Image (spheres, rainbow, N blue to C red):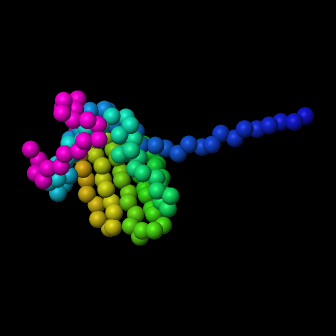
């Protein structure tokens, strides 16, 4: 008797996509950003590009998602920790090169009529 076993590849955790629309991002250093997003753009922004010489990993814990990226051609590695609700608000802690900062994100609603997904507006001081 011949038995064929098909192995199902284990799928790594992925970062959840944010609710489509306009997101307000406020960093500890006073940088304020508005991002208009949809599912396609958000996947690129949240997951990051997968460079050939880079190794990326997403781990989900009970309270947060941890995204780590290390590239063979660079000494710098980056770690992003996301916590919260990706439909209304979340926090992102960015650690790179021995420093870290936290960014608070809040969903504002639909993108403005003059915006398209992928549009990002940077301000130095909030509002």
Question: In the picture provided, is 9 more to the left or to the right than 45?
Answer: right
Q: Where is residue 25 drawn, in percent x and y?
A: 22, 45
At 29% from the left and 65% from the top, the residue drawn is: 99
Q: Give how far across and how far down residue 115 sits, in percent.
A: 21, 35
Residue drawn at x 35%, y 46% is: 45
Front one among 37 and 64: 37
Tell me the residue at 25%/41% (across/down). 119
Whether residue 46 can be seen here: yes
- Snapshot quadrant of residue 75: bottom left
Residue 108: x and y in percent read: 20, 33
Q: Quadrant of the C terminus?
A: top left
The residue lying toward the viewer, choosing from 122 and 65, is 122
Q: Is 33 above or below relative to 116? A: below
Determine which quarter of the picture holds residue 24: top left
- At 31% from the left and 32% from the top, the residue drawn is 20
Membership of 43 in magenta stretch: no
Q: Position of residue 1 (x, y in %)?
A: 90, 34
Q: Residue furthest right?
A: 1
- The main secondary structure of the magenta stretch is loop
Residue bounds of the magenta highlight: 105-127
Please, is residue 71 above or below residue 106 in the view?
below
Report if residue 66 is visible in the image. Answer: no
- Position of residue 123 relative to residue 96, above or below, is above
Residue 54 is left or right of residue 83, and the answer is: right
Q: Residue furthest bottom?
A: 75
Query: Camera-side residue: 104 or 41?
Result: 41
The mark total stands at 0
């Amino acid at each position: 008797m011949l038995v064929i076993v098909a192995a199902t590849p284990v799928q790594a955790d992925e970062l959840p996509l944010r609710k489509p629309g306009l997101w307000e991002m406020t960093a500890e250093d006073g940088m304020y950003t508005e991002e208009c997003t949809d599912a396609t753009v958000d996947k690129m922004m949240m997951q990051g590009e997968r460079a050939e010489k880079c190794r990326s990993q997403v781990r989900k814990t009970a309270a947060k998602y941890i995204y780590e990226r290390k590239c063979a051609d660079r000494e710098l590695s980056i770690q992003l920790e996301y916590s919260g609700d990706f439909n209304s608000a979340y926090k992102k802690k960015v650690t790179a090169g021995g420093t870290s900062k936290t960014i608070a994100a809040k969903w504002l609603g639909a993108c403005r009529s003059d915006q398209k997904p992928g549009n990002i507006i940077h301000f130095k001081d909030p509002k």
